[in-house]
Image (cartoon, grey):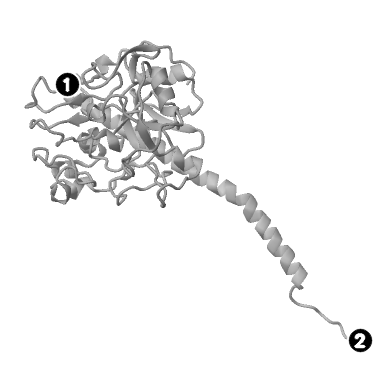
Amino acid sequence: MSRLRFRFGFTLIELLVVIAIIAVLIALLLPAVQQAREAARRSQCKNNLKQIGLAFHNYHDQAKQFPVSISWSGNDNFRGAFSDKVFLLPFLEQTANFKLTDLVTDCGAFDPGGWNCGGGNPNIRTQSVRFPMFLCPSEPNVVASGQANFSYAINHGTSHINHTGGANIGAGNGNHNGVASFVQGAGAPASHWLRSDQSVHTGKVSDGLSQTALYAEIQIDYMPSQPGSDPDPAKRRTQVHTWAGGASTQDTRLDCLSPTKGLSGRPNMRGRAWAWSFMGVGSAYNHTMMPNEKTCHSYTDDWGGSNLMAAGSQHQGIVNVAMADGAVRTVSSNVANPVWWGIGTRNGQEPVSNF
């Protein structure tokens, strides 16, 4: 009488086939999972900009102007330089933190670099806080401790009044043509080289609120772990390069793009401290450079609120921009130069359709 034999388990070949099938499925699913996660981060990023835009308008309803981006102390020095983000705190459900801010002391805004009284700054308790609404969740770079980092900045316009020529815009050369304003303290002398901008309110946005950029993403500075090492291109474009200038917006952009422009002597600064308005930390961005392009230091002086820091993001090929009417737009890195320059100005009367 024969016996039936039953085999349980897998052979080695069968097991390897199953593992290979699972590996292929994971390889197929992983990009989809990553895309879904990035889509969620991008959505949160846009929502952060939406909240900042609403806060600007709520501030404007009370103050009848947008918050100033630099407010120097009356002691003819560069302390007391609070960013617009400080004054937006009450309109971003951070009233308690704003009330703890010392707006009178000579130390002024807290910065991790120690320029404004260092560790003795009374504002360290609130201004070294990491606020998610000031950071895009897709941003991987970190500078200083990372606690006070930010990846959104206010638009201060273009480098020149006329994009193909004419006077540049900066300290001593008239007002900026974005929505940022840079105002000294009341005690500063009228002859000070950093002459004040006029404050900006909606009535001065003659191009139209829906046609003028208010806030955009910027990228936190990346520096390689080894001095002199060359990071990959995606990281290199987040780095700040040295000073650039020119006779027009167009020339200034090309000067910044020149391969002769080396890295800045101020590493690990851009995106460092959300409360500090110093332009070296990228407290405002400029529309001279295209989205996700190279970034350079000022064409005039960074204390006057001028720089060539490009809008940029970790989202592939785009940057999110909050317009002055509160809407958030997704702008391609390939946007036409005149269109990007046009939405960067509040009063240039440029045609800015199709962006």
- Where does label 1 land, which residue? 195
Mark 1 or mark 2: which comes first in sequence?
Answer: 2
Question: Is 33 located above or below residue 315 in the figure?
Answer: below
In percent of the image, x 42 and y 47: which residue is there?
Answer: 228
The answer to whether mark 1 and mark 2 are in CB contact below 8 A is no
Q: Which mark is residue 341?
A: none
Identify the amino acid type marked 1: Arg
Q: Residue at horizontal 31%, vertical 35%?
A: 282
Residue, far front: 260
Residue 185 spot, x, y in % from top left: 11, 28
Spatial CA span between label 1 and label 2: 105 Å
Q: Amino acid at mark 2?
A: Ser
Q: Which residue is mark 2?
A: 2
Q: Is residue 101 left or right of residue 206?
A: left
- How many marks the image carries: the answer is 2
Between circles 1 and 2, the one closer to the viewer is 1
Which x, y percent locates residue 255?
41, 24
In the picture, residue 220 is in which quadrant?
Answer: top left
155 shown above or below 113: above
How many other residues sit within 10 Å of disc 1, few (<14), some (14-19) or many (≥20)? many
Q: Quadrant of the N terminus?
A: bottom right
Q: Quadrant of residue 123?
A: top left
Nearer to us in this view, 255 or 68? 255
* Image coordinates for residue 144, horizontal then vertical, percent: 30, 49
Q: Residue furthest bottom?
A: 1
Q: Which one is in front, 16 or 62?
A: 16
